[in-house]
Image (cartoon, rainbow, N blue to C red):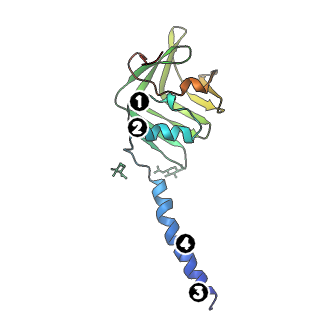
Amino acid sequence: MTTSLPLLLLLSLLLLLLSPSSQSSDLTNLTRPVSRAHAELTTYGFPIGLLPADVRAYSINATSGDFYVDLHGPCRLTLPPDNYLATYSEKITGKIVRGRIAKLEGIRVRAFFRWWSITGIKSSGENLVFEVGGVSAKYPSNNFDEIPACGGGKRASS
Ligand SMILES: *[C@@H]1O[C@H](CO)[C@@H](O)[C@H](O)[C@H]1NC(C)=O
Ligand SMILES: *[C@@H]1O[C@H](CO)[C@@H](O)[C@H](O)[C@H]1NC(C)=O
């Protein structure tokens, strides 16, 4: 009894210490500033250049990986390195785990005279693989090291 009581106390103390922190990490703040959404991309192994600058809000369920990103409005830009015209909807949704974005909705590219939805993106670190329907295209990740600006893809440098 004399040894089990301190152990019990220790355990309940641990529980007290652990429960608030594990709870707060589950609650994703919906109004984080821009840089946080981009920083979050990098923690999942993706470059920041996949998201335009004008993020209004975002949320990720750390358990399931379901996420959404709200922009200030629809966004049109050109994707490097081949300068494909791309559009981002005001709301982008998907499911993200390390190195893989699936069920992506809200990003489309113009190629071969029509618009295609990018449905998934894989990252190996060095390369990004964009999935467009059954087809995929691979590009070096370092093409996406800069956060693109909306509006026809005008960039300060290049
Ligand atoms: C979200 O973060 C902002 C800025 O850090 C803070 O002002 C706000 O209270 C937070 N909201 C919630 C629901 O935690
Ligand atoms: C996050 O995802 C898990 C697993 O799908 C689910 O049980 C939980 O309710 C989700 N949390 C929120 C806040 O939606």
User: Considering only order in the chain, which callout, 2 or 3, is on the residue closer to the N terminus?
Assistant: 3
- Lateral position of residue 28 relative to residue 136, left or right: left
Q: Amino acid at mark 2?
A: Val
Q: Amino acid at mark 3?
A: Leu
Q: CA distance from mark 3 to mark 2?
A: 49 Å
Secondary structure state at the residue bearing disc 4: helix
Q: CA distance from mark 2 to mark 4?
A: 35 Å
Q: Quadrant of residue 98?
A: top right
Does residue 58 sit above or below 126 in this rendering? Answer: below
**Callouts 1 and 2 close, C-beta under 8 Å:** yes
Q: Marks 3 and 1: which is nearer the front?
A: 1
Residue at the spot of label 1: 53
Give the class, few, some or many, for how many residues have Cα within 10 Å of label 4's Cα (few <14, many ≥20). few
**Callouts 3 and 1 close, C-beta under 8 Å:** no
Residue at the spot of label 2: 34
User: Considering only order in the chain, which callout, 4 or 3, is on the residue closer to the N terminus?
Assistant: 3
Q: CA distance from mark 1 to mark 2?
A: 7 Å
Q: CA distance from mark 1 to mark 4?
A: 41 Å
Q: CA distance from mark 3 to mark 1?
A: 55 Å
Give the class, few, some or many, for how many residues have Cα within 10 Å of label 2's Cα (few <14, many ≥20). some
Q: Marks 3 and 2: which is nearer the front?
A: 2
User: Considering only order in the chain, which callout, 2 or 1, is on the residue closer to the N terminus?
Assistant: 2
- Lateral position of residue 120 relative to residue 67, left or right: right
Residue at the spot of label 4: 14
Q: Which mark is residue 5?
A: 3
Does residue 157 sit above or below 4 in this rendering? Answer: above
Q: Is mark 1 within 8 Å of ligand 1?
A: no
